[in-house]
Image: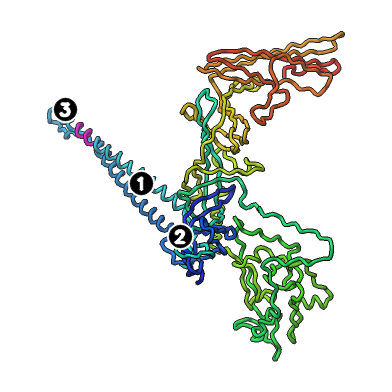
Amino acid sequence: MTAGTAQRWASALDSVVVYAQGALCRRLARGRVPADGRVRVTGLPRSMDRGSLRARVVGTPDVRVVEARVGIEAEPAGLEPSESLRREVERLREACAAARGRRDRQAALVEEVAALRPVPPPRRRADPHRRTPVDAWLELSDFVDERLTGLHDGLREREEEVRHAEHDLAVALDRLSRASTAAPPDGVETSWSAVLTLDGARDTDVEVEVEVEYGVPGAVWVPAYHLTYRQGAAEGRLLLRASVAQRTGEDWTGVRIALATADLRRRTDVPRLRSLRIGRRQAAPAPSGWREPPAGLNDLFAGYDAAGPRPGAHAAPAAAGARTTGAAFAAASPPTPPPPPPAPAGYGAPPAAPPVPGGAPAPAPQAFGAAPGAQALTRGRPRTGSRAAAPAPAAPGRPAPPAAAGAAAGSAPTPPPAGPPRPSGDELDYTDLVLHGPQEQHGRRGRLFPGSSVDPVTAEHRRRAGEVAALPLPGHAVRPRESAGSFDHRFDAVAPADVPSDGTWHTVTIGEVPVGLRTEYVCVPSVEQTVYATLVLSNVTDQALLAGPVDVTVDEAFLLTAALPTLAPGGVRRVGLGPAEAIEVTRRTNLHESTAGLRNNTTVLDHRVHVELANRLPVPVRVEVRERVPVGSDADVRIEERADWTAPEGDTGPDEHAPGTRVWRMELPAGGTAALDGGYEIRIPAGKALTGGNRRS
């Protein structure tokens, strides 16, 4: 049974782990194992990384997966989603135009009725004056008022219809702009699936569950928080949320979401260390999956070469009776078309080869099973019994090939590097190897080379998925890799969530985290006579809280959105809440200059600082007043402090204080005031004092 006729199992997306960039999706499929054990799990997105496919059997230890690879299915393309959205947009445009027309007609009726005025008949010169019919005027006014009341009610209804129609049209236009524009070629739609081979099933009537895991690009996330607490409380409730955006090509509906700060593309394989042995040298073992090329591979196309060039090929006729060699065939073959442009770099794309110095073309990769020396790029020397491809002799009457000409000139070929052959991972990926035919170059014909596994439609899907990484971040948001530092963290959501594949930010609730907090007020009156409210948060859990925006709600009233710094387990940080206008601060300074010493050879600068605080709040508050004293580097200049302030202890985290910072901490009762006095003396010897200058700063 081929892969195309394998039994099809429908799969459902169960969970997703979103990394700093990219995501790891997990699908579940259930069914009965067929006799040959081959099944096809459908539903995989086009943007997935084919090398990340993993599969295993869940709950049935006797059955295991012995082979897993990516398969392609083709079916006639139905109605494109973009086409249905386009029709919906046209319908809504017509409905919006009709609603505007009804509103305009209603407005015209309002203007027509509002323009009704009583017009008296023309009076002739001989006619006497007539009395004004007041009753008729009043009846007309009542009619106009009654009519306008009904028309205005209808006009409001028409305007409401127009607003709804314009809103629906705007939503449809937005959905159309976000829809994929990658149309399947030739009306054929292709999809990817996982082709699995199961082994160990003794009874075909038993259902088994298969878990398929794969990586996709186009998914990012940033943390967000919502803090709720009450005034005077020592604890608060911090709701951990996340803004998730994804454009992987499949909607995440009702899936379990986890968030990780790790890099999905980082290599995690363990390096292999070669052992050092003392004794006789032993040959290194050949790599797994490597096979030597068969003997006489170049003679396989002798008959093809003897048949001459293909019909339509522009080549000079060969000499009569001469056998067409590989060099002659290469000369007679049409020029090789230029290679296609490389696919855009994205998730899972191999790195581009560096340019070769001097402008020389990059060497082609070695074929799978090719003998060393067949190409300019060799990965090892041949084993015993392998035969290198010898250059073919030139045909009679033709110039020698470039290689032969170089050999005749005395240039020796480049020796292959020592050691066993070391094929790369691409050369050992059997599903992507392509067998080259006789029309290829002489060193590539009949050999396996890695082929291009990214078709134009898949490349377009990956390009659109990569656009998510360039989305503008929400306010105060920080990338997880920047805030996590050298550690990696994972956060699991408590409930399933829905994240559509539209490339916009969606909020997902992760869980609730208890935090300790206290409210403190900080002021630096020497810089600004304003008191600022702050929250001192402490992380009492064993999980780090990453930097991000936090919505602060106090006593069930929204206060503001602030920036939460990274909180390590057990860490304490301060979050600013803005100015506190209910607390006033006033600062006054006084400078007295004098001399001291036996001969008055010491200048004494006496600085006095007076700070007054007033609390207008109905609750007691804790205020921290920061001052600064000079810091000298000369041992002869002495600074003597005369105050009860203290140096900062740094109990609010790694806040960097300027040298010479001093702190007053005090409790202010509700409606109370306080005065703080401090100061310092600077004693400068006469030989180091400056004449003049500003003594106050």
Query: Could you say which is closer to the camera, residue 687 or residue 256?
Result: 256
Mark 3, residue position: 134
Identified at 55% across, 36% down, the residue is 549
Magenta span covers which residues? 141-148
| Structural distance between the alpha carbons of marks 2 and 3 | 84 Å
The spot of residue 690 in percent (x, y) is 81, 18
Query: What residue would you read off at disc 2?
Result: 10
* Circle 2 crowding by C-alpha within 10 Å: few under 14, some 14–19, many from 20: some
Q: Amino acid at mark 3?
A: Val
Vertically, is 74 above or below 558? below
**Visible residue check, residue 379:** no
Residue 414 located within the stretch drawn in magenta: no
Mark 3 burial class by Cα count in 10 Å: few <14, some 14-19, many 20+: few
Marks 3 and 1 sit apart, C-alpha to C-alpha, by 46 Å
Residue underneath mark 1: 165
Instruction: Select label 2 or label 1 by which is in front.
Output: 2
Asked whether, in this view, residue 22 is left or right of residue 139, the answer is right
**Residue 131 shown left or right of residue 178 in the figure:** left
**Residue 61 image position (x, y, % from top left):** 54, 58
Which of the pair 59/65 is nearer the observer? 59
Label 2 residue SS:
loop
On screen, residue 517 versus residue 159, left or right, reads right
Residue 411, by quadrant, is bottom right
Residue depicted at x 66% and y 76%: 445
Separation of residues labelled 2 and 1 (CA atoms): 39 Å
